[in-house]
Amino acid sequence: MREPRRSSGALAEARPGDLGQAFEFMRALWAVDHQLQTASKRLEASVGVTGPQRMVIRLVGHYPGISAGKVSELLHLHPSTLTGVLQRLEKAGLLSRRSDPADGRKARLLLTGRGRSIDAVRGGTVEAGFAGPWPASHPAPSPPRARCSTRFPTSCRADRSPPGRSERPGRVRRSVNRSTVIVDWCGR
């Protein structure tokens, strides 16, 4: 059921919880996104890579020889988005691509010496913030308690055509999982 609209006089009394659970949930996600964007800019200024670039470096450092497709899958990034990240890391001399000995069409990702030094940085990173002390009201989860959900309402999915647009006849649309990942740190 839709809530009634409020008059302009109600603006002074506006409270975050007035618009319902769905709105509050979206506000919380946007707040997390804003904090991650801010942390990414700080990381770039101090270490020289953005948050997404750091995540790629950490994965390639942990899994030398990993394919770009697997990195894309693990980070929930569209392959075309990852291509730009990989190109910037290569141009900066932090990452190299080598042909897969078993299949020359595939590339394997490796860190350069400079990339390994960025991988070794532990302070001033987003993950360092999560590794630090947690407030008593929300203790840090143990790995089995941290649950993720990739469910996203079908009406909001990023891989759907915009309303009013139809696919071109004969065009095969590749389904891409671009669902938002929501982590339940409370372990409920």
Image (cartoon, helix red, strand yellow):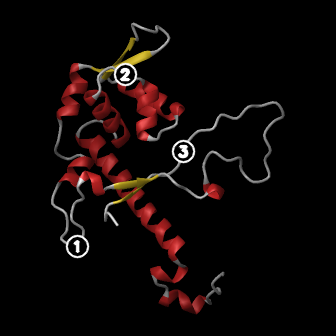
At x 32% / y 63%, what residue is drawn? 187
At x 28% / y 36%, what residue is drawn? 48
Amino acid type at image mark 3: Arg
Question: In the image, residue 114 lies at what x, y percent?
Answer: 22, 23
SS state under label 3: loop
Quadrant where the C terminus is found in the figure: bottom left
Looking at the image, tell me whether mark 2 or mark 1 is earlier in sequence order.
2
Query: Which residue has dot 3 on it?
Result: 178
Can you tell which quarter of the image residue 73 is in?
A: top left
Query: Which residue has dot 2 on it?
Result: 90
SS state under label 2: helix
Image label count: 3
Badge nearest the viewer, 2 or 1:
1
Query: Which residue has dot 1 on it?
Result: 137
Q: Is residue 173 left or right of residue 187?
A: right
- The answer for how far apart the CA atoms under marks 2 and 3 are is 25 Å
Badge nearest the viewer, 2 or 3:
3
Can you tell which quarter of the image residue 175 is in?
A: top right
State whether residue 75 is above or below residue 106: below
